[in-house]
Image (cartoon, helix red, strand yellow):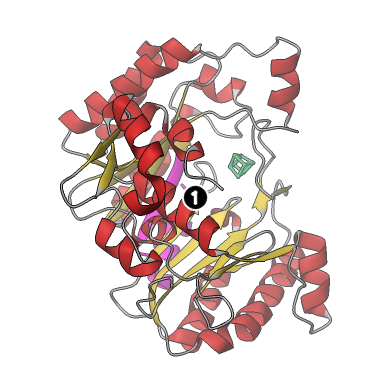
Amino acid sequence: VLEDDGTLGVYVHVPFCERVCPYCDFPVVAARRLAPEREEAYLSALLAELEQRGAPLAGRRLATLYLGGGTPSLLRAESVARLLGAVRAAFGLPETAEVTLEANPGTTESTRLPAFRAAGVNRLSLGVQSFDDTVLRRLGRAHRGGHGRAALRAARATGFAELSLDLICAAPGQTRETLAADLEEALAFAPEHVSVYELGIEPGTPFALAARRGQLATPDEAECVRMLALVAERLAAAGLERYEISSWARPGHASRHNRRYWERRTVLGLGPGAWSLEAPSPDAPFGARRANPPLDAWQEALARGEPPAPASHEVLGEAVARGEAVFLALRTARGLDAARFAREFGAPPRGFYAAAIDELARAGLLEEAGGGDLRLTARGRLFADTVSAHFVN
Ligand code: SF4
């Protein structure tokens, strides 16, 4: 049975972006400036969904609230304040809760940041990606390096104690030199947290089409490995700990919300396309995963006063949950806690995956500690998808 500590994380998907980047496969729509009526219709639907789907979860302790997207910083601060007020009314919003808002440079340097902070946001995550204008242009991003610097300065001036920024790796036009310069510029702002994502070419995106036509020059695999090594080395030298494959933080500043996904804790996902991980119940001892429908269907149902029908709802079977428990935990530096695994599934990982563990250990991708805990090696972190495939049912 899935372990349940009685806490709750809430994720709110804000589906609007200034423009849709050609590599993005998130559920987003372009809204150059978010018209007040459109924002109001979205917010009303969101508050209705919170009321409907939050009610059965009342009594849980709210640990994290995460406004992601999309570009949540396109919302006016009054909207964010209303949303936080509704979350407070539904679950209480303890002082200790981590409240993150994702922001894109260019939508944030203005006067909004102090108002977001006053509304109760205590952690800002900035989608900087790069400070290099060539890289940003080729990624089709709406902002430039100067916007990234200005947003970081504004975030620091506003006094956010928790500042995170996202950088991209292996983008078209990026070199080890531009990446090194990005890291130096980022570190100059002494962020508490840095995420570095390798550019993925997702099916159905304009980048996937360009790649098929041979029109997308991204660094090759060997160069990607060198770039990721550079990232790991430089961030470690700056005192940031790599606590997950793509995430670095100063000690004590890891993202508590993201950790919920790797630990498979209950998350209520609100908004179009948002994913929820439902708590275990007698009918679903390993929990269930639910995806919300896209914007129009989601908003129309809620405007009629009806709950939006999920786009998918999967009660997790034991074998699926077991495989996920392994590969999600392996993303983290802590790795898989064999004792927790045994409490949930009745036997330690070796009881189910002895052949895979031995094969991956022989290949130098996985380490097994005395108590059966499992962890990726440095090499394993480069090939995490290959390792995961051994545990997927
Ligand atoms: S800003 Fe982010 S979420 Fe929005 S389109 Fe670009 S990559 Fe996607």
117 horizontally vs 29: left or right:
left
Query: Is 100 above or below relative to 144?
Result: below
Q: Which residue is mark 1?
A: 103
Q: Which quarter of the figure is the N terminus placed in?
A: bottom left
Q: Position of residue 194 (x, y in %)?
A: 33, 41
Residue 246 shows up from this direction = no
Q: Kindly identify the residue that appears in the image at 62 percent across and 59 percent down.
A: 14
Q: Nearer the viewer, residue 334 or 135?
A: 334
Q: Secondary structure at mark 1?
A: strand
User: Toward the viewer: 81 or 101?
Assistant: 101
Image coordinates for residue 10, horizontal then vertical, percent: 49, 70
Q: Is residue 330 above or below residue 36?
A: above
For badge 1, the amino acid type reads Ala
Magenta-drawn segment:
108-127
| Residue 215 position by quadrant | top right
- Please state which of residues 334 and 149 is positioned toward the viewer in this rendering: 334
Q: Quadrant of residue 233?
A: top left
Q: Is 180 placed left or right of 77 in the picture? A: left
**323 or 221: nearer the viewer:** 323
What residue is rendered at 69% in x and 17% in y? 211
Q: Residue 190: x and y, percent?
A: 23, 40
The quadrant of the rendered image in which ligand 1 is seen is top right
For the point 64% across and 37% down, the residue is 24
